[in-house]
């Protein structure tokens, strides 16, 4: 009898072990992506702080690019072009094994578009967040001048040498983060720098074989008064983008509603389609 009980217990343990192994094998491995985040004009890497933290806590890898002439970078403005920005992003991406999810905001949309034309096979998805999305032959100024609903133009003050563009300080937070907390508005003001002007006028040359081959996603910013929702819709249609999400925020959703942005980026990175 003791022998029979011992055999039964051994069999039960073996079955339990096999069952446990089977269940573990059935659990999909955690999905991890590398995100490269590119800020827009009049901003700097600090704007991604909360989104970066959310992504890292979720097990993702994140690189935040500081564009030349922004943040702490002191590159002279007369030397800057859209290609200079492109090359800085490509340099950051070269440190990553495999493909990246490349994210651009505002003017950063011009940058990631230019990057995708140069190194399309390095990018799994392009993600535009309230961003300029040009067609071949267009510059940022071409798109901005076609946006009658934008309130940015009247607030711009060019420098005497035309190399820099300032935003009237009294208009700054109303344009970029009208729906943000006072603390975030204060951060925008504290980190503000005038914007190099030359890259705004640089046109992109795009091909179907390169830029056209990269999967694209657009996150619309519904309360945006810098790049209006109507211009966003026209750019989305022009690029033939089918995967479209939206956040009910101003021009800077990563400051106003960072969790909404990081949640969307996680879903995009995992290839999960959610209802916009």
Image: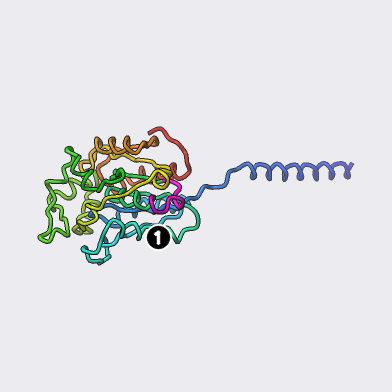
Q: Which quadrant holds the C terminus?
A: top left
In depth, the one of 35 and 259 nearer the eye is 35
Q: Is residue 249 left or right of residue 268?
A: left
Residue of label 1: 92
Tell me: residue 222, above or below residue 91. Answer: above
In depth, the one of 218 and 142 nearer the eye is 142
Residue drawn where x is 70% and y is 41% of the image: 19
Question: Residue 17: horizontal and vertical position, in percent?
Answer: 72, 45
Q: Which residues are magenta?
A: 117-125
User: Residue farthest to the top?
Assistant: 275
Residue 180 can be seen, yes or no: yes
Mark 1, other Cα within 10 Å: few <14 / some 14–19 / many ≥20: some
In depth, the one of 49 and 13 nearer the eye is 49
User: Residue farthest to the left?
Assistant: 160
Residue drawn where x is 25% and y is 51% of the image: 184
Residue 263 can be seen, yes or no: no
Question: Residue 94: horizontal and vertical position, in percent?
Answer: 44, 60
Residue drawn where x is 18% and y is 43% of the image: 145
Question: Residue 7: horizontal and vertical position, in percent?
Answer: 84, 44
Tell me: residue 270, above or below residue 65. Answer: above
- Quarter residue 63 falls in: bottom left
Q: Is residue 22 left or right of residue 84?
A: right
């Amino acid at each position: 009898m003791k022998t029979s009980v011992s055999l039964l217990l051994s069999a039960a343990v073996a079955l339990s072990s096999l069952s446990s192994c089977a269940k573990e094998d059935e659990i999909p491995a955690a999905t991890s992506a590398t995100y490269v985040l590119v800020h827009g004009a009049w901003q700097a890497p600090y704007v991604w702080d909360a989104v970066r933290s959310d992504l890292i806590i979720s097990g993702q890898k994140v690189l935040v690019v500081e564009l030349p002439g922004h943040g702490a970078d002191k590159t002279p403005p007369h030397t800057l072009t859209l290609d200079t920005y492109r090359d800085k992003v490509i340099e950051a991406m070269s440190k990553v094994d495999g493909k990246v999810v490349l994210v651009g905001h505002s003017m950063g949309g011009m940058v990631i578009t230019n990057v995708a034309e140069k190194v399309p096979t390095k990018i799994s998805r392009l993600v535009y967040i309230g961003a300029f999305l040009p067609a071949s032959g267009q510059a940022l100024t071409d798109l901005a001048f076609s946006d009658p609903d934008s309130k940015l133009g009247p607030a711009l003050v060019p420098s005497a040498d035309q190399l820099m563009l300032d935003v009237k300080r009294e208009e700054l937070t109303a344009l970029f983060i009208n729906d943000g907390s006072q603390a975030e508005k204060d951060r925008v003001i504290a980190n503000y720098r005038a914007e190099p002007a030359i890259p705004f006028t640089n046109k992109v040359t795009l091909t179907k074989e390169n830029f056209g081959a990269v999967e694209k996603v657009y996150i619309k910013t519904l309360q945006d008064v810098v790049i209006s929702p109507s211009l966003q819709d026209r750019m989305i249609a022009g690029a033939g983008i089918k995967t479209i999400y939206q956040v009910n925020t101003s021009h800077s959703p990563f400051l106003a509603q960072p969790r909404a942005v990081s949640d969307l980026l996680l879903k995009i990175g995992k290839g999960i389609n959610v209802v916009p």
